[in-house]
Amino acid sequence: MHPDNRYIEGLKHNVSALINEIYANHAAKIERMVLANNGTEADAADVFQEALTDLYRKAHAGFVLTCPLDAFLYLICRSKWINLLNKRKRSPVTFTDTLGYSAGEDAHRNAEQLALQDAKQQLVDEQLARLGDSCRQLIEHWQNGIPLEKVATLMGTTYGYIRKKKSECMGKLIEMVKNSPAYKLLFS
Amino acid sequence: MNYEEIEKYLHGGLTEEEQNSFERAIAADPALGAEVALYRQTEQQLLAKANAAAGEAQLTEQLTALNKAYFGQNDKTPIVSIKKRKRLFYYIGGAAAALLAIFLLQPLLHTQKSADELYAENAGNIYSFGSNSRGGDGSNPGAVSFYAAKKYKEALDILEPVVTSNADTLLAKAVCYLETGNSDKALAIYNSLAAEKKYANKANLYKALLYLKKGDKAACRKSLELIPVDANEYDTAAKLLKSL
């Protein structure tokens, strides 16, 4: 774990002082990168906010930073901005990097890990959306921290049935995840 | 695959003997071990997503404010998700048309709002719950979700048995009581919090809303007037006082 992981924890727990530090230390660099590549201040703010929101979600999924935040955040924002430029069909012929030094292997590895985690989460979300209503509702109640006893009451049935049903629903979800084309690529 | 067995293994549904036997089976069968790992990983992903969702609105609010400070956005378009920007144009157009209509119709509108109208206008902005990632005292993400969706009965089902001294959870519980027709219980909670210096201002603000909901503007005013100028709640209280 890198000492900068405290910023990831700061995002996870919404610690204002640490989040403010992230802005103070990195916002200007991201703005420079976006402005140097056909973007505006508003674009830079959007990209920065989305990158931090992604990091917040990943922190809740157990992501741990093992490299300096500076280059890592730059890589995430860079990738988001290139994707957006491609969508707008305004991709520059050559992308001007403004980091001033090489991001390093660690930062690339962390960015890849984040992207992999994102793809896994997306796969589970997609399959959850495809589950039948009763299974999806049961899993969502459980996901929201409602004890299974309470879920049984809410769904008008017994605890024993709900517990069995939850394992069946999780089983269905896992089978759907395993049968999806992306599974081998992401989970191998 | 017997997922029921995996569920029981991961969540304490097996006897000690069954647990040991299952562990031996995992050790002997890597495929079973992989299934257990995937089951656990999928559960963790589902829970992580729900935990993140509970505090995301508050984070977004904070990031939006910081964007204004660090990206010089004060007089420009507010920061919204890139995906939502296109939709924003329609909203702005609609809002502009609505504002124009309100301006033109202003002489025909009543200037004095009813207690019900004032309650509806202010309650949503004042009632907040889920200030940390798991809500209140850290144990009620389900209640936070129901509360955010204004499903107060369902939120109360979860909050009612919770014994806590956490002020946010207690305030949320009181709001649930109030919204489900039990204003006496809500008032008792507000009064107990108002007795503690640390929570008095917030409790008085909530109490003012309770009186507003009951249609008692005078009592509402009295509660608001207890909030001192240096309190965080003062601006909200002053604004509400002005509109009473």
Image (spheres, coloured by chain):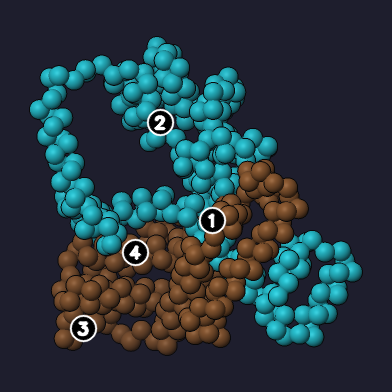
Eye-nearest disc, 2 or 3: 2
Mark 3 surroundings within 10 Å by alpha-carbon count, few (fewer than 14), some (14 through 19), many (20 or more): few
Image position of B154 (left or right of B243): right
Answer above or below: position of A110 versus B182. Answer: below
Q: Which residue is mark 2?
A: B123
Q: CA distance from mark 4 to mark 1?
A: 31 Å
Q: Picture quarter containing residue A94?
A: bottom left
Q: CA distance from mark 4 to mark 2?
A: 29 Å
Label 4 in the same subunit as label 3: yes
> What color does chain B have in the rendering?
cyan
Which residue appears farthest toward the left when viewing the image? Answer: B104
Do the residues bearing badges 1 and 3 touch, measured as CB atoms within 8 Å?
no
- Asked whether the viewer can see residue B100, the reply is yes
Q: Secondary structure at mark 4?
A: helix
Label 2 in the same subunit as label 1: no
Q: What mark, if any, has residue A133 been given in the picture?
A: 1
Answer above or below: position of B221 versus B82. Answer: above
The numbered mark, 1 or 3, whose residue comes first in the sequence reads 3
Q: Residue at x 41, y 53 (%)?
A: B59
Q: Which residue is mark 4?
A: A50
Which chain is rendered brown in the image?
Answer: A
Eye-nearest disc, 4 or 1: 1
Q: CA distance from mark 4 to mark 3?
A: 20 Å
Identify the amino acid type marked 2: Ala
Identify the amino acid type marked 3: Phe
Q: Which residue is mark 3?
A: A95
Please state the horizontal and vertical placement of residue B174, each as a whole percent of the image.
Answer: 55, 29
Quadrant assignment for the N terminus of chain B? bottom right
